[in-house]
């Protein structure tokens, strides 16, 4: 278990041979005097698929626009493939963008849309025919070349937007909420399809999204953003299992939250007093420190040994969620306990007195004294 | 809604239809009919042959078309940047622009025309400025010229050019120029390959408005250039009011109507063609 009580706000990128393919350094940005980004760093390797994940207003779209050159940072540099592109206009960066609404040109046909970037690079109409056809074939839209954009469905438009972005062989592909305009079923299909397409072509890509499932599904690593900062930058399983901050814990899935105060240090464990009794968690903190305890719901069981953390409570809600059941208790105003059980026939109902058990090492511990928002 | 109910609602169009038919279509039809008859009342195109054979009438028609074309062109050249600026204007600035464009429409042409004469006359503002800057030695004739007419008419019709262009620009997805930029298109390519083609329906509509109004204008040329250089509309009025030549007047009306109709049909055809893909 990682030492989690001192959240590291900075990114901790994995060491890779060309970990600095894209190196965004010390970005500062203010809108009308309000600082929205203050020294943000972001770094990724060639061929990586990364998501910028966060709630609206967290700065993820601002960061995307700064990387694309559609917005100027007040300070900082953007280094792509060894070149500082921070002062280049967007049309000289060779960074393609798939926009949220796809931004296809309504006055051009499908093929003309895909050819746009090639023509802008000086390629003749005749020379563009072959790459355009290949790009359309890549997204299985070759039969639609002469169609009008408005005659396409949302999913088809997205494919054209991807083909248009990829045909120019960009150094970097940025995708701004690319799936948000699609309905849920189609969204899942397109996520799988797009991920394997980008993976096969070795595309370096950044997805901007507010949807944690989407970020988990499509990316190698996720940068969770909050208030213009990257709270944690790691692979999906690390993020989920060991979120660096309460914000990351809450943003990626549900979890039990109990507030308490450190009672004592017991070796590598900290004993915490909560309204529901004493709990233990891995970590090192001074007695009296206000803390937040978190547990992922699938790690909680209804029975367990004496060496586990245990909380007795009365169920407030039992929700059947298809293949699983979520048991919920709310012992205090801020406290919330969630237990996820496989299957839906477990005989529990609202008002039942139960005990939640979980392993001490599965307990997440956050220091609230540093002013971190719980 | 049932078909029967829809039919009954459809009846509501009758009063308007009857009004238009009686007050507008019927007299116009009679006027057109007159233009195709000779003095004895027999069907004939003699009047048209005579008009197009007369150098004076030909020059009037040519001037009318030339002025209308130049007015449209000038209005377009001024309206385009205005509409571009208005698209990015917000809040108070946008209101200011809209008021500045729409309010002058409520000011009568007569008032405007006399205001211009202050500007255009030989000791007027324009001549004095040009002379002060040593660009000209003696006052140039502006009032009672075609130039003054074109400038004045473009001013009056400007709102009808700005508003349709602004409307299409405003509806454009602001991401489109950005998308073009990320695909490698520089400012010129973005302008000519994305912004302009998408604005064409508005440009066509504005040109059709302004041209059809400019080709049939009567008050503005009467006030600015007077009888000296006539336009078709002035000639029509003169035929009916002074020459008492209803034959000539109705034939000229027919010609003017044909020009207007072809502009409307031509522009809607063009707009449909441009809009087919959008």
Image (tube, rainbow, N blue to C red):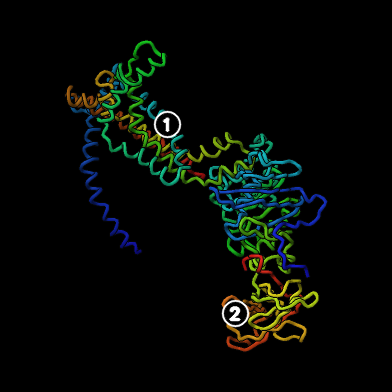
Foreground of the two, A230 or B275: A230
Cα–Cα span, label 2 and label 1: 65 Å
Q: Quadrant of the C terminus of chain A?
A: bottom right
- Label of residue B214 in the image: none
Q: Farthest residue toward the top?
A: B137
Q: Is A334 on the left or on the right of B127, as rendered?
A: right
Q: Is A11 on the left or on the right of A227, as rendered?
A: right
Judging by the rendered image, the residue that carries numbered circle 2 is A319
Judging by the rendered image, the residue that carries numbered circle 1 is B78
**Residue A76, quarter of picture:** top right
Tell me if mark 2 has few (under 14), some (14-19) or many (20+) residues whose alpha carbon lies within 10 angstroms of its own. some
Q: Is residue B259 above or below residue A270?
A: above
Residue at the spot 74% in from the left edge and 65% down from the top edge: A238
Foreground of the two, A307 or A177: A307
**Residue B263, horizontal then vertical, whole percent:** 38, 33
Q: What number of labels is visible?
A: 2
Q: Is residue B83 above or below residue A268?
A: above
Q: Secondary structure at mark 1?
A: helix
Q: Is residue A319 above or below residue B34?
A: below
């Amino acid at each position: 278990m990682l030492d989690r009580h001192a959240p590291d706000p900075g990114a901790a990128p994995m060491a890779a041979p060309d970990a600095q393919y894209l190196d965004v350094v010390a970005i500062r940005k203010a809108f009308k005097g309000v600082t929205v980004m203050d020294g943000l760093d972001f770094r990724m390797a060639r061929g990586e698929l990364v998501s910028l994940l966060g709630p609206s207003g967290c700065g993820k779209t601002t960061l995307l626009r700064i990387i694309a050159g559609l917005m100027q940072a007040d300070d900082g540099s953007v280094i792509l493939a060894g070149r500082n592109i921070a002062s280049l206009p967007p049309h000289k960066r060779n960074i393609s963008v798939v926009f949220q609404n796809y931004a296809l040109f309504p006055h051009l046909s499908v093929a003309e849309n895909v050819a746009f970037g090639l023509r802008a690079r000086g390629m003749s109409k005749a020379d563009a025919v072959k790459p355009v056809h290949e790009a359309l074939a890549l997204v299985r839209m070759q039969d639609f070349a002469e169609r009008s954009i408005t005659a396409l469905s949302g999913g088809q438009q997205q494919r054209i937007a991807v083909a248009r972005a990829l045909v120019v062989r960009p150094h970097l592909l940025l995708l701004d909420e690319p799936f948000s305009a699609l309905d849920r079923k189609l969204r899942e299909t397109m996520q799988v399809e797009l991920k394997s397409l980008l993976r096969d072509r070795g595309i370096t890509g950044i997805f901007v999204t507010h949807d944690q499932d989407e970020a988990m599904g499509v990316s190698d690593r996720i940068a969770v953003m909050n208030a213009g900062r990257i709270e944690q930058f790691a692979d999906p399983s690390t993020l989920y299992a060991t979120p660096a901050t309460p914000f990351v814990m809450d943003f990626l899935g549900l979890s039990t939250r109990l507030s308490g105060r450190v009672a004592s240090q017991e070796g590598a464990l900290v004993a915490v007093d909560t309204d529901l009794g004493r709990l233990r968690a891995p970590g090192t903190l001074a007695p009296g420190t206000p803390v937040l305890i978190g547990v992922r719901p699938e790690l909680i069981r209804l029975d367990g040994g004496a060496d586990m953390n245990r909380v007795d409570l009365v169920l407030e809600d039992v929700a059947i969620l298809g293949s699983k059941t979520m048991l919920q208790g709310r012992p205090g105003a801020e406290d919330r306990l969630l237990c996820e059980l496989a299957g839906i026939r477990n005989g529990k109902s609202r008002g039942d007195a139960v005990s939640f058990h979980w392993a001490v090492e599965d307990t997440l511990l956050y220091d609230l004294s540093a002013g971190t928002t719980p | 809604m049932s078909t029967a109910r829809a039919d009954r609602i459809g009846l509501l169009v009758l009063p308007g239809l009857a009004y238009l038919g009686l007050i507008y279509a019927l007299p116009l039809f009679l006027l057109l009919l007159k233009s195709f008859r000779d003095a004895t009342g027999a069907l004939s195109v003699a009047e048209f042959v005579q008009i197009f054979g007369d150098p004076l009438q030909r020059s009037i028609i040519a001037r009318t078309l030339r002025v209308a074309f130049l007015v449209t062109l000038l209005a377009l050249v001024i309206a385009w940047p205005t509409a571009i600026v208005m698209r990015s204007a917000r809040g108070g600035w946008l209101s200011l622009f809209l008021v500045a464009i729409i309010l002058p429409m409520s000011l009568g042409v007569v008032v405007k025309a006399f205001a211009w004469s202050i500007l255009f006359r030989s000791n007027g503002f324009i001549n004095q400025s040009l002379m002060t800057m040593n660009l000209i030695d003696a006052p140039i004739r502006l009032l009672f010229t075609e130039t003054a007419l074109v400038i004045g008419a473009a001013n009056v019709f400007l709102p009808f050019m700005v508003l349709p262009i602004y409307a299409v620009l405003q509806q454009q997805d602001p991401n489109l120029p950005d998308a073009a930029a990320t695909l490698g298109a520089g400012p010129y390519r973005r302008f000519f390959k994305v912004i302009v083609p998408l604005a064409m329906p508005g440009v066509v509509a504005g040109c059709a408005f302004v041209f059809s109004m400019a080709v049939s204008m009567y008050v503005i040329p009467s006030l600015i250039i007077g009888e000296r250089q006539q336009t078709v509309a002035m000639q029509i009025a003169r035929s009916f009011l002074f020459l008492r030549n209803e034959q000539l007047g109705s034939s000229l009306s027919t010609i003017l109507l044909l020009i207007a109709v072809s502009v409307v049909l031509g522009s809607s055809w063009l707009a449909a063609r441009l809009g087919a893909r959008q």
